[in-house]
Image: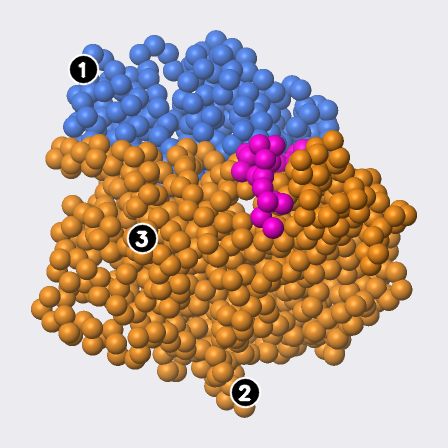
Amino acid sequence: MTETIATTDASPMGRPLRRKEDARLLHGQTNWTENIQLPGTLHMAILRSPMAHAKITHLDISAALERPHVVAAFSAKELGDLNGSVPCVWPVTDDIQMPAFPALAVDKVVHVGDCVAVVLATDKYAAADALDAIEVDYEPLPAVVDMEAAIQPGSPSVHDAADGSHGTNVCYTFPLQPQGPGAYEAAVAAAGDNAVVVKRRFINQRIIAGAMEPRAVVASPMGMSNEMTIWSATQIPHILRVLLALVTGLPENSLRVIAPDVGGGFGGKLQIYREEILAVQIARKLGRPVKWVETRSEDMVATHHGRDQIQQIEIAATKDGKFIGLKVEILANMGAYLQIITPGTPLLGMFMYPGIYKMDVYDFNCIGVFTNTTPTDAVRGAGRPEATFAIERIVDELAVELNMDPMALRKMNWITHEEFPYTTSAGLTYDTGNYEAATAKALDLFGYDALRAEQEQRRASGDPVQLGIGISTFTEMCGLAPSRTLGALKYVAGGWEHCTIRALPTGKIELITGTSPHGQGHETAWSQIASSILGVPVDDIEVVHGDTGRAPYGMDTYGSRSLAVGGQAIKKAAERLVEKARIIAAHQLECSGDDLEFVQGEFRVKGDPAKSQPLAAVAFEAFSAHNLPDGVEPTLQAEATVDPDDFSYPHGTHLCAIEVDTETGKATIRTYVAVDDVGVQVNPLIVEGQVHGGVACGIAQALYESVEYDKDGNLLTASLADYLIPSAVDLPSFTTDRTVTPSTTNSLGTKGVGEAGAIASPPAVINAVVDALRHLGVNDVRMPASPENVWRAIQVAQGGAK
Amino acid sequence: MIPIAFDYVRPGTIDEAIAAVVAAGEDGKVISGGQSLMPVLRLRLAAPSTLIDVGSIAEMSGVTDAGDHLLIGSNTTHYAVMNDPLVKEHAPLLAQTAATVADPAIRHRGTFGGSLAHADPAGDLPTVALALEATIVAKGPNGTREIEAKDFFVDYFTSALEPDEILVSVKVPKLGKGWTTHYEKFNRTAQAWATVGVAAAVRRDNGTIAEARVALTNMGPSPVRASSVEAALTGADATVDAIAAASANAADGTRPTSDLHASAEFREHLARVLTKRAVVTAAGV
Ligand SMILES: Cc1cc2nc3c(=O)[nH]c(=O)nc-3n(C[C@H](O)[C@H](O)[C@H](O)COP(=O)(O)OP(=O)(O)OC[C@H]3O[C@@H](n4cnc5c(N)ncnc54)[C@H](O)[C@@H]3O)c2cc1C
């Protein structure tokens, strides 16, 4: 009944409301996991491997037990059966190699930071001090860090084969050839002399998630009855509960997982970590609360990393610029172990290499590779930034080869707005989009022609500071996804989301969501959606989340899914609540439900506005139950679980103008324009924040951040002095705008936004850097485009190869 | 932060501080702003048995005009230094450089003396002290001693201070008429240390450069004077070309390291480019 949700002028949908959670957060009225202090808590400190690859030849924890305030210490031996195995829920192929991943290493360590033993003490200082007393002898084994070396025969192997013989570092091989094997080669051959082929090797470097709040966990066996309560700085309390039950054997119905205030995640907290398993198992064994708070140094080695691909990419087009096809071969670094979705992360990008372009054939292959490094997994964008970088970079290279303007080449090949829904060469069906509109708006804001003119002039005058222009016309897939599709991809869980809405007797609304925000502003946005349907003020809606005790159903927050999927559940639950209330109101007003209209939070008898009943009164009636119609049960609540029809496909056009100092190699962004199409915006202010953060994150990858190891597997970027995260001072003022092309597969018309900026921006920046240096013979600059990488690219191009 | 346990004392005078340093013995460590020492403690790279916090010793703070030089108390924060009218007038190079150190929070805590005592090859202020030919005043159980900046920075994170000495103040000579200065800092993010930095001070005599001092940050274990550049600049025309030619020698005699932010080779290149820029700006060409 569409008229029941007709929004009025008073509707908060689409308004840039300030986030209602912020006053509390900014005033420090917060509840981080570290703030949780339970009587009798034991603090856990972890002894981590200083070696990238070694046999543990001797390990004795006993001296640690003699240290003051120490209550217990464990290595794998003492933990015995409680040393659970860390799960991976995405075995992408039938023959994937899935090595054992014990919470505490058994006999062998495989990366720097691997967990070897733990100490539990009554204070955190004593626990850290006592780590010194643990005796460990390592027999170093050769380490392998470089992926290309790791897949050579005879390379040291990170894990032995199941039968104990020398293993292979190939975790899996995953091809995707929608047009069949050999179709790409055949299409290129068929084009004969008319085909132009450009090949490149791109490195999408390893980065960290870098949440402001490091990880933390408190496991308390002191709950009611047999309950074990686990507070964790996690993005996924619901999934964590299921997995902790499976790993520990504790009954799921005795586990309660709470994600209290969580200070950022960026994928790094989309995980079940060994520290969480250890805290639960040891709390269970000792019968006392166990607490672990990660240090920043641990965060660098032990929280999963992201990206890390070597891409061989080849694009074929006709001489006049029509794309024929794309061939992509990637090596994806798994690190030393498989975490929750390590193997699937690069495959989240496999459908996206064709981007927004029409082409006949697509050929993809991914080899997952083990190395003696920290495991990788999802970090903001997870697979799609890598794909988008590859396609948007190579389109620029093709434009140069064809001597065409890079924007003209894009326009010639992109899906036009009349062509939606459009099934791409990778096999996805994009529901909607309007690349023309977003691009037109971006070009307008950017001043493309004037910048090109300035570029010409700087080139002509030999200015040491050159100007470059970079384009990224991107799309991405987020809001995973119909559960059926996830099943077909061998992902263990589904992609649905849940919402329960309760109208309380006092007229207040409790909105219980299965999403688990950690900075996104769900409390405000979710209230806006419910308010627009229920007519109740935003401030009268309390959003309950992140606690499996209070919000029992959910699939949590990652992959830009919360609004795209969870928003639909809110809408459906709210509409159901209105329908139940309508029955009660009709009874009260002695009319038929069809005679009622629901406007601004009250039921009004059509044609007789004097007769009305506000929702709050209906809620009280449902509570007192004095006069309910026959067959209507007391309480006014409704729930909905929505399995999305499809992925969500946000898109946009990002343009970057960058000044490159050719003497020092320093690249400074001058103008950055981001026009995104995220469909209907519930709260444009929150969208704006997400775009800013995402773009900053992508610029950080393009210009600053990189996880570096030496050849022995020692982490060189072990602190934030070495791993450079830019701050606001280092970033330009962004020019942003939106076009709105509502999604047709989403009942709210919304799309995801959390990752879009991080996906779009790296190629815009690098294309700009390369464009600035093209006349010097440069046709690629490695990310991050640090001063030295830029300077070296110029040196090499100028023949002074270094 | 989970450092190794230590004792903590907070003397109120210089003499009390020296007594505390002597009492603590080898494993004592002086702390002032803590902006370099705390990270070291956090990483458990140092395990002092006692921290002697000199931060509240009033007689070690502030800037005074001492005639031909400024006397800057060791405890004077970067923030105070960069905003001090005397420093701005008589040692603008120091004011300008202090403003480039880290971020506002760190500048409000970190101190001038601590920065020199720390002797970080990537520190900006040691380079400025060298360029301005400052003198470091240290006091220990045997009394006060003065050390010229050129003798003070001995090696990586090593100064000429004796373990029982406290850096009390710094004498910064006034540059006098005709001198103009500039610090050219090259770093990757706003609050990062210098990849390379160049302090330049120039005295112009009409169209020529009468005198020049150039000191380099992060081009070796300690700040160094680019003496061949200085020699080439003396008497040279105050033109971009002449300065560029002189700056080509900037890496001579340096020993930069390779790290994540730059290789030694790139640092040598940067030293040349940045020296040119620093001198051009200082000379107002
Ligand atoms: C993120 C970050 C960025 C930074 N960036 C820069 C930068 O760009 N440029 C730069 O120059 N610096 C930078 N610093 C360092 C900063 O300038 C520090 O303030 C300074 O190096 C040390 O001063 P402090 O007073 O904090 O010394 P502390 O940390 O207290 O002490 C440092 C060392 O000096 C010794 N010491 C301190 N005071 C005395 C004294 N009176 N007598 C004897 N010994 C003493 C201590 O024992 C210790 O060994 C940065 C620091 C951080 C954390």
Chain letter for the residue marked with disc 1 in the picture: B
Number of residues whose C-alpha sits closer than 10 Å to that of mark 3, classed few (under 14), some (14–19) or many (20 or more): few
How far separated are the C-alphas under marks 2 and 3?
A: 54 Å
Q: Quadrant of the C terminus of chain A?
A: bottom left
Q: Residue at 48% of width from left, 65% of height from top?
A: A345
Magenta-drawn segment: A1-29
Q: Nearer the viewer, mark 2 or mark 3?
A: 3
Chain letter for the residue marked with disc 3 in the picture: A
Amino acid type, residue under disc 2 in the picture: Ala
Instruction: State the image quarter where residue A13 is shown.
Output: top right
Q: Which residue is mark 1?
A: B207
Whether residue B281 appears in magenta in the rendering, the answer is no
Q: Which residue is mark 3?
A: A418
Amino acid type, residue under disc 3 in the picture: Glu
Which color was chain A given? orange
> Eyeballing the image, is B260 above or below B241?
below
Number of residues whose C-alpha sits closer than 10 Å to that of mark 1, classed few (under 14), some (14–19) or many (20 or more): few
Q: Residue at 65% of width from left, 75% of height from top?
A: A85
Q: How would you classify the magenta stretch by its main secondary structure?
A: loop
Q: Is residue A501 visible?
A: no
Which color was chain B given? blue
Looking at the rendered structure, whether the residues under marks 1 and 3 are on a common chain is answered as: no
Whether residue A19 appears in magenta in the rendering, the answer is yes
> Eyeballing the image, is A129 above or below A154?
above
Q: Residue at 38% of width from left, 59% of height from top?
A: A421
